[in-house]
């Protein structure tokens, strides 16, 4: 298993993809942190009609600023998860992979573990960008960005979030062997369809009970970020329950994809 994990990590970090994604994740984290820090602390926003939706405490403000870029970050790791297996199908290397390591379960286990490591790696880069730039602006405006230990919990959970979304992408990449189609569908559902579905469900009483269990809503509740500009989280899940929901999505997608791979005739 150790050799298989090293092989999977080597596959990823010997391509140009990893540093391109690294730059994107770092800059996204920093840019959104700067944007949120300036907007959420501006007098026009805090004193306007929408002041009730603005984070009212130092803790809420810091969490919103530091996790502002996560919504883009998890789309990137989702794409990485898709490409981890999708590129193997696209370049016809999946056969040689399983010939080199005949135990498919070992290969898939290595892919799962390596994706969690890769997700945590990009999470660290995102936090370096968001915390350094966001904290600098908050401190300059007289705020205390590390006023509560729960902020550190949110920062730690953000590493897990990116890894879990990468596993969701792995499942999508297996279920949809065409890499381009898998990427378009995965990003389209996560970025467009799911938010629209959440808004539609939120208009009905029964739908409001379903909305908290959508992946993006669970992510927001898990980080207790309120979705950035929203201040407090609007769904009813506490952070640990939301973490279980997102973990369940990742486990189901990666687990079903692994099961399909173990039984599929690959040539």
Image (spheres, rainbow, N blue to C red):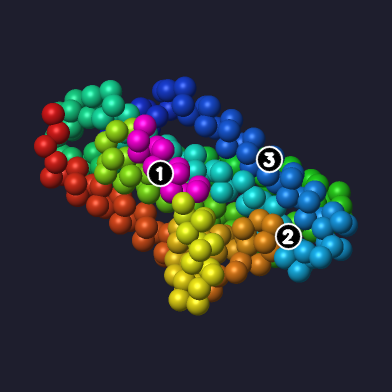
Q: Nearer the viewer, residue 123 or 232?
A: 232
Q: Is residue 50 magenta?
A: no
Badges 1 and 3: C-beta atoms under 8 Å apart?
no
Badges 3 and 2: C-beta atoms under 8 Å apart?
no
Residue at 37 percent across and 54 percent down: it is 250
Q: Nearer the viewer, residue 207 or 40?
A: 207
Mark 2–mark 1 Cα distance, whole angstroms, equals 30 Å
Mark 3–mark 2 Cα distance, whole angstroms, equals 16 Å
Q: Position of residue 67 (x, y in %)?
A: 63, 52
Relative vertical location of residue 85 with respect to residue 151 in this rendering, above or below: above
Q: Position of residue 127 (x, y in %)?
A: 62, 45
Q: Is residue 184 magenta?
A: yes
Quadrant hosting residue 266: top left
Q: Position of residue 58 (x, y in %)?
A: 76, 63
Residue at 50 percent across and 73 percent down: it is 204
> Count of labels shown?
3
Q: Would residue 200 be found to the left or right of residue 249 on screen?
A: right
The residue that label 3 is drawn on is 30
Q: Which residues are magenta?
A: 180-192
Badges 2 and 1: C-beta atoms under 8 Å apart?
no
- Indicate which disc residue 186 carries: 1
> SS for tag 2?
helix
Q: Position of residue 187 (x, y in %)?
A: 45, 43
Mark 1–mark 3 Cα distance, whole angstroms, equals 25 Å
Relative vertical location of residue 255 with respect to residue 214 in this rendering, above or below: above
Q: Is residue 2 visible?
A: no
First along the sequence among labels 1 and 3:
3
- Indicate which disc residue 61 carries: 2
């Amino acid at each position: 298993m150790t050799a298989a994990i090293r092989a999977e990590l080597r596959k990823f970090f010997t391509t140009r993809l990893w540093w391109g994604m690294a730059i994107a994740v770092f800059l996204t984290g920093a840019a959104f942190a700067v944007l949120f820090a300036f907007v959420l602390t501006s007098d026009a926003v805090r004193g306007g009609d929408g002041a009730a939706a603005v984070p009212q405490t130092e803790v809420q403000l810091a969490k919103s600023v530091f996790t502002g870029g996560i919504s883009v970050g998890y789309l990137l790791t989702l794409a990485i998860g898709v490409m981890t297996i999708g590129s193997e199908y696209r370049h016809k290397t999946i056969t040689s992979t399983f010939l080199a390591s005949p135990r498919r379960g070992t290969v898939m286990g290595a892919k799962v573990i390596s994706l969690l490591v890769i997700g945590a790696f990009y999470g660290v880069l995102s936090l370096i960008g968001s915390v350094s730039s966001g904290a600098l602006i908050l401190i300059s405006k007289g705020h205390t960005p590390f006023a509560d230990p729960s902020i550190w919990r949110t920062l730690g959970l953000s590493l897990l979030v990116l890894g879990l979304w990468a596993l969701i992408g792995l499942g999508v990449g297996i279920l949809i062997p065409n890499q381009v189609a898998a990427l378009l569908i995965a990003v389209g559902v996560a970025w467009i369809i799911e938010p629209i579905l959440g808004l539609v469900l939120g208009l009905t009483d029964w739908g409001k009970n379903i909305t908290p269990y959508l992946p993006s809503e669970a992510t927001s509740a898990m980080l207790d970020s309120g979705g950035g500009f929203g201040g407090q989280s609007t769904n009813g899940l506490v952070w640990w329950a939301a973490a279980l929901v997102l973990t369940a999505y990742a486990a189901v997608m990666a687990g079903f994809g692994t099961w399909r791979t173990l039984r599929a005739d690959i040539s």
